Amino acid sequence: MARQGALDWTVIVLTCQHKDSVYAFQRELEVRQQRGSLPKGALLLTVADPQERLGSGGATLNALLVAAEHLSARAGYTVVTADVLDNAYILILHTGRDFPWDSCGRAFCWLPEQCAAGSVEQPVCCLDLHLSILTHQICSGSPPGVWVCSTDMILALPSIPAMSWDSFYGVRVLSLPGRVRDIIYKGPEERIRQAMGPDGKVPLVSGPVFFCREVSERLLQMHVTPPLDGCTYLGMDSGAPPLEISLFLDVLRCLCSDVREELFVSEERRGCASPHGPQGAAVRNARALLWRTLRGTPLTLVYVADGGYDYMTLSGLEHVRRLTKMGSETETLSHVQNVESLGAGSRVINSILEGDIIVSPGAVVQHCHLKCSTGLCSDIIIPPGLFSVWVHIGANPRGTDFYDRTGIQPGDLGAVGCGGDARPCLLDLRLFPVFESRGGSVGLGWAQWLLAGGGAGGGAWAGAWEVGRWRAAWRLSLREVLSCTDQQGELLWREELFFRAARRRAGDALTGRTDRSLLPSIRAAVLGGRQEPLLQALDSVAAGSSEDLGIAARTLACIADVLGCLAGEGRGGLRSGPAANPAWGPAFARLERGDLPGGVQALAEERQNWMSRPDLLVRAARHYEGAGQVLLRQAVMSAQRFVSVGPGNLPPIGEWQEVECPARLDLSGGWSDTPPITFERGGAVVNVAVRVGGRRPIGARARRIEEPRLLLVSSSGGRGGQVATETVCLTLQDLEDHCQPHAPGALLKAVCLCSGLVAFPSQQPLGQQLLQRWGGGVELQSWSLLPHGSGLGTSSILAGALLAAVYLCTGRSFDTDSLIHAVLHLEQTLTTGGGWQDQVGGLVGGVKIARSRACLPLKVEVERLDLSEDFLLSLQQRLLLVYTGKTRLARNLLQDVVRSWYSRLAAIVENTEQLVSNAEECARACAEGSLSRLGSCLDRYWQQKKAMAPGCEPAAVRNMMAALRPLTLGQSLAGAGGGGFLFLLTHEPLQEERVREVLSNTQGLGDFSVHSVEIDMEGVCLLPPSQSSLGPDPGP
């Protein structure tokens, strides 16, 4: 049965001309499989041709034999059997002959393109293009069989060919539909015109050929049948004479309907072994065998009207034009220090250019690391042409221009193997000096001189070269250079350059604060075993970013990603987790003190102790993320400069100062307020202050007491009543756990420190501080009438209420903007992190939009929307809260979102931009009084939340929202999602009972409750002392 989608190959065979290429090319296949571009379960084989001129047909027979032999061995057979072909999908790729413009052949010629949307950064070679097109476009859906294709051309298939595989039998190639009458190779023009199709075009055989299961078995049987056994390694090992066979002109041509047996067997045809030469009898016998074995098999074609075919000829000029026309980017997997020096239409591929290196228009630089240090040379000029680390080719040495420019004479270019009047070939001209009798090996100066001559365009390198020195040097032809190529060494050099350039690009991406994701580069480095150089490079970036802690924090997060990748996906535990192991304490302490270089160094030293197991690597990654949070806190604390607290009236000891606050509903833009997103990209949030059940559900009060102590009482309640926790602080040591969010009274302790109530750390005891500053101690109480994890911004709003109460009871004045920024500072001290929208929502009344710019220090600017009374009334009558009964786990969600942002996942970056634009649209909808547009913004906002934090929609909530969809203009879970309150904007006003009825009739929802809300126009409310009281809990 045919498979659909990308074809999952059973075997991929790569044939090569030279035996010493096998190990190098096999490693290249394995690297691609490791990076995910080849199926994990595919058997990868690199097979050398048994002899040099075997022909594409002979190479195919030999490759099929080797593939069947390996499959037979895997299946437990002791002999080669065709049974292994039954369900096998075999791909045979031929690398062909040497290519003068790439020492590793056409298959591994790098192209100026990058792998689109790949999870692992990797180059695109001709081989990769073929693998992608064959796997995803041409071969997809085919039945089991053998696909054969060469790699000496570049295919372009904008559309997927329409091929029917139902009951397919025979052989298929890509060209015009229908049966093949003949295959013409270098035929006369008249005959080619006869092959013209209805569209005025001649069908071109593009390379891919498919042999069905039955035909593949017939081909396999030929390895034991003389004289075709001479095409395989088994035949040659058995003493059979070697034989050259063409795939298209021998194997396939015998299937063409217009071809007659006598002509097929005996005719001379270009590109094939001669049937009348020294091996004439063997050639004729082989053709006759092919005819008897394969004749009658249908040969059909598939025509791709919009396809492209570019055969890679031996022309250097054509190859340069090919590379300069492909792609749109000048740089591909390279690092260029001075990008302004790159000429229009030039290409830099897998290279590093340092200093003043000028790349002329039309030039191609590949696989080079060139450096021009200031003071050592004025510049390096690369003229048009191809510049590679192994050879430098420019204009062909023909015509008077080349000779005039260099002083070389035709007689100097003695061609290798060209005698008499034979016209010399460029491949055989001894152009390239490699050794001097006195100076030894030569550098690269000759190359620039050869291209530019002795003129001013030659640059600093060419200055020392002249024609006399060139004549005296030992020179090689390009063919001789190619014969000396160490392909394994060349491929390893390219790989080293690839990783070296990637590390430099990573540094640029971080210091330039770009949105480029480093995860593909990180995965490539880890898979390639180059994680240590990458970690060292990231250490260097982090240590040198003292002026921008945001860069340092992101860099530490990238180091965490490296460690996570080393652990392996799904191994070692979850990435989110604690980060307070004492072993990392000294490094964290240095960061807290502001010693960034020392802290980074200490982290790197401790890291070496955690590299041996996946679980240790994951825990180390958590601590690197924790170290990043230390720097992030320091960056966000810059908001403290916008906190202005002045003198006020000091109330008497014992008088309560009470503050109440509404909850908030976030209508659009949440997550864009979260550091580091908010100061790296900018944020905008629209929210509304609401009372729940007619009450402001969040409050705090404070009073001075005579005893020099801190009495801290926090009460939390839901529908079941209140639970109070009392903490007494008599010494400064009792405040040490203020930065541990789950410690008893941690929020209230952090308020005491951040409000300036006491100094910590300090040499002065707590009691003395309190007596000296305030004439006694302070009692501080807080309460919330909302359940834990409500999503209504409770903790941040409560922090604002507590700060306000402390300021009032200690005789200090403040404004709402100061409270907003003070809460930002406080939450960083508490280490809970989080953004600024919660306190904005509860401290500022009504509907408003708050914004922050993409810069530090972090400043929040709030704009209250001037809305009509009618719109506010309509909005209030249509807003409803539904308690889902699910507790929201915001901390894990926050860690995941920050990690995704630091990784600059494309979906997160795009979604962040959409969050901000949706918030602006939401504000406009409110200002223009459009409830329908507001509802659309709510629905869009909920989709954006889910994109930001996958998993924030429990199944019960999904069912609840689906049941309520007919009643609503829009709906969303409040806050980060995951549970808590769902808020609705209904079509009709006053739908509380209707919503309750619908939910009661919906199965599987569990414990829920429905609540009306009132828009609170005041925000934070300071109650007169005479009105201070802690009323009973009304419950949600």
Image: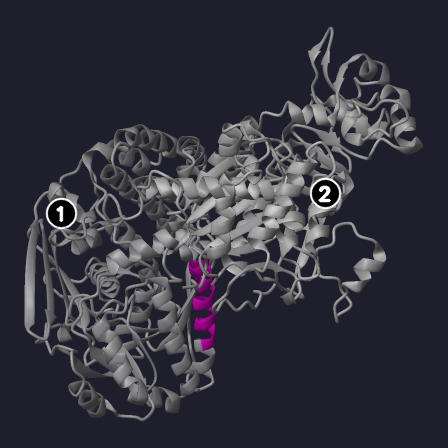
Q: Nearer the viewer, mark 1 or mark 2?
A: 2
- Above-or-below relation of 25 to 128: above
Graded by Cα atoms within 10 Å as few (under 14), some (14 to 19) or many (20 or more), the crowding at tag 2 reads few
Q: Where are the magenta residues, as a range? A: 906-921
- Above-or-below relation of 62 to 513: above
Which residue extends farthest top?
438
Q: Quadrant of the C terminus?
A: bottom left
Residue at 16%, 78% (x, y): give it: 1005
Residue at 55%, 44% (x, y): give it: 60
* Image x and y of residue 914, in percent: 46, 67
**First in sequence: mark 1 vs mark 2:** 2
* Image x and y of residue 884, in percent: 19, 75
Q: Does the segment drawn in magenta span residue 917?
A: yes
Tag shown at residue 771: 1
Please state which amino acid type lies under the numbered disc 1: Leu
* Left or right position of 409 against 18: right
Between residue 924 and residue 448, name the one nearer to us. 448
